[in-house]
Image (cartoon, grey):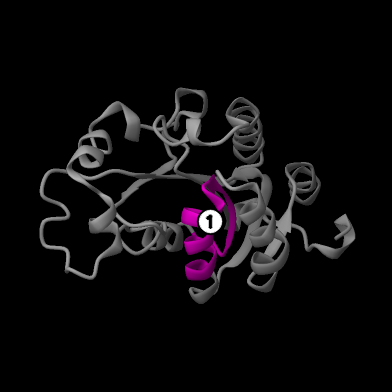
Amino acid sequence: MSFQEHAPIDPKHAALVVMDYQNGIIPMVDNSEELLSTAANVIRSFREHGGTVGYVRVGFADGELDNAPATSGMAANVTAERAAIMHADGPATQIHDAIAPEPGDIVVRKQRVGAFSTTDLHEQLQARGVDTLVLAGISTSGCVHSTVLDAFDRDYRVIVLADACADPDPDVHRFLLERVFTKRGEVIEVRQLHHLLH
């Protein structure tokens, strides 16, 4: 799409939501350094325009999955070894220092794949009058995919930053960006976001 095909973004009613950019997940993708640099730049720009910046991280406190039903895929995936690594207070679940939150940012911790179902992110966004979400995250097939679908169902305008998302499987990453997300929102690059915010 050309720049003209996207409506401008009003930063006062928009939030940049950065998902799972945490110490234990970033190394899973090949272009991690470039991704961090891109994320840091877009976060800085979003703040300068007066938009809300939100962070979502995944981590599990003691006993948090103990009562999950037998059908829970998340509980099945979080083995005892993985639970130790993914502990809510452990270093692997902390947001990377290169894009550290600042006072006034939204920060939530989730226990499932998507950003909404186990957090109060929606309530915090609504309290700030946010109706547009700009999404960045790792991985495209995980948190980004789940959040795009949920945000669409919650009536947000959904914008995915293609070059601020990544997935361990490049083919899946491309397929989702090109064939799936465009049915539920807009897919743009960071350079386009700068234009739309101006």
- Return the x and y of residue 139 as percentages of the image width and height: 52, 48
Magenta region: which residues?
Answer: 129-151
Between 80 and 180, the one lying in front of the other is 80
Q: Examine the structure image and report whether residue 45 is included in the region drawn in magenta.
A: no
Name the side, left or right, on which 131 lies relative to 143.
Answer: right
**Residue located at (44% from left, 40% from top):** 105
Q: Amino acid at mark 1?
A: Ser
Between 23 and 186, the one lying in front of the other is 23
- For the residue labelled by badge 1, is the local secondary structure a helix, a strand or a loop? helix
- Return the x and y of residue 176 as percentages of the image width and height: 64, 61
> Is 189 placed above or below 5 here?
above
> Is 181 placed above or below 154 here?
above
**Residue located at (26% from left, 40% from top):** 82
**Residue located at (34% from left, 64% from top):** 117
Between 39 and 28, the one lying in front of the other is 28
Name the side, left or right, on which 158 lies relative to 194.
Answer: left
Residue 121: image quadrant is bottom left
Name the side, left or right, on which 160 lies relative to 125.
Answer: right
> Which residue is denoted by mark 1 in the rendering?
141
- Return the x and y of residue 135 as percentages of the image width and height: 58, 52
- Return the x and y of residue 174 as percentages of the image width and height: 69, 54
Q: Examine the structure image and report whether residue 142 is included in the region drawn in magenta.
A: yes
Q: How many marks?
A: 1
Q: How crowded is the residue under tag 1: few (<14 C-alpha within 10 Å), some, or many (20+)? A: many
